[in-house]
Image: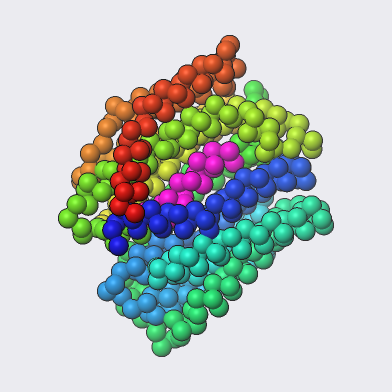
Amino acid sequence: MNKYKKLALNTAVFAIGSFGSKILVIFLTRLYTHFLGKNELGIKELLEPTVLFLQPIFTFALQEYLIRFGLDKDYNKKEVFTTSGVMTLSGMVIMALIVPFLRFIPALDYLKGYSAILIVYVITSSLRMLCQQFVRSIDMVKLFSLDGILATLTLLIFNLIFIAGFKMGVYGFMLAVILSDFLSAAYLFIKADLRKYAGMRFFNSKLGGEMIRFAAPLIPTIVMWTITSLSDRMFINSMHSDTVELGKGAVGVYGTANRFPNLISMVSTIFLSAWNMSAITENDSADRNKFYEKVYSAYEAVLFIAGAGLLFLIKPVTDILTDYTKNPELRTVYIYTPILIGAVIFMCLNQFLGSIYSATKHSKNSFWTAFGACVVNLVMNYFLIPTWGIQGAALATFLSYFFCFWLRIVDARYYVPFKFNGMKCLTNTALLGVMSVIVIFDAPMKHLWTFIITVCIVVMNFSAMMSTVKKMLKRA
């Protein structure tokens, strides 16, 4: 199958399976903001990135090595699945022994009362990831898509039961995710008949060592990205200021503000699920560099157009997706979103460039570029949050992703030297920056000015997007 056709087809299939669940997460924001108090929202927003922090460490970056080795025709699928499963279960045992002691760390005091359910949350999430990634690696993308739809339904049902029905608060949220993930893992295991890939006779310690060597630099890389996300919330929760409000309530506001840029991340994640497969399988193709250039230019164009559109509509979108009844302080949440939209755009671009490191097996470069972003984020959080509060955390996040992007766009193109228009990227960024200032400070005639800038961004990026889309449609 032609590479453009396969990328388009896989993107469509992943969209069908993922779109519902991604949209649901956004709309569940209204459910959470209605039934959870501001401190409960803060705890929830601290627990979620904590899971993302623990998972790659104790699964040894399962999401990275399983898809990389599973797609590679040089490796036995049964050995890949069984070895991955043994490594994952071993990591879960270690995690269960360590997590109960984390609550004694002052900065992690929010774990008190949640350690046991957090352990179960990470285990079920990891088992689902194991089955999901392997199903993708054996090219059962339609089953992957169907599972996404079913998981969406179960997550919605369990949230309604435990949060809206039983009023279980944060426990209800975590229990809903646990049950949804468990049913998803069981469904994939049975439907894909993964039992035939499982058995200790297929365990290969040599392969396990190779996976660990590949994943070792990626574990701290993923952790660095999680720290970038979690540290914002931890600084807001634990720091004190005489000028701005901080604490768990402010964490809840910041977490809610992060939900809306995830509309962009949602589209990006769907595409990247398909792109990572193409990046690996097309790594040795003759026209690889041109392929990257076409896809990257279209991807960047879509991100900036989507960012401008969301910024233009941010106030009505926020009003629709947020319930202010229980938490009236959330009425101002939209002013913290503009900078986070820019941050998400560069996070998505970093993920695209990270696929180059994965496809070419230069995972160490992924680590040191992420480490640079993490350092910038921590330093900026320390200096900006006491003065600017939530807005300081948003700016620190943007600066860290922006810094990492320029490191990667230079470094990654040593391995895949595709053409990149830096001036166009900077112009797009500057225009989004102007829109952000207009929205944050409620400038006169803000609707007119944001509309004009949105049109400018669409016009500037439309041709790059459409040239690649036409290429896909023509060859599809």
Q: Is residue 103 left or right of residue 376?
A: right
Q: Which of 323 and 103 is in front in this view?
A: 323
Q: Which of 411 and 142 is in front in this view?
A: 142
Looking at the image, which residue is at 43% across and 73% down? Answer: 84
Q: In which quarter of the image is residue 349?
A: top left
Q: In this view, does 58 lie to the left or right of 409?
A: right
- In the picture, the quarter occupied by the N terminus is bottom left
Looking at the image, which residue is at 49% across and 49% down? Answer: 226
| Extent of the magenta region | 258-276
Q: Report the colour scheme.
A: rainbow
Residue 106 shows up from this direction: no
Residue 443 shows up from this direction: yes
> Which residue sits furthest front?
474
| Magenta stretch encompasses residue 263 | yes
Q: Percent position (x, y) of residue 11? A: 42, 54
Q: Percent position (x, y) of residue 100? A: 63, 63
Q: Nearer the viewer, residue 386 or 117?
A: 117
**Dominant secondary-structure state across the stretch colored magenta:** helix
Q: In which quarter of the image is residue 318?
A: top right
> Which residue sits furthest left?
286
Q: Is residue 136 left or right of residue 99?
A: left
Q: Does 104 sit above or below residue 430?
A: below
> Which residue sits furthest bottom?
201
Q: Percent position (x, y) of residue 277? A: 36, 59
- In the picture, the quarter occupied by the C terminus is bottom left
Q: In this view, does 17 lie to the left or right of 315?
A: left
Q: Percent position (x, y) of residue 93? A: 55, 72
Looking at the image, which residue is at 31% across and 39% down? Answer: 467
Q: Does 380 sit above or below residue 34?
A: above
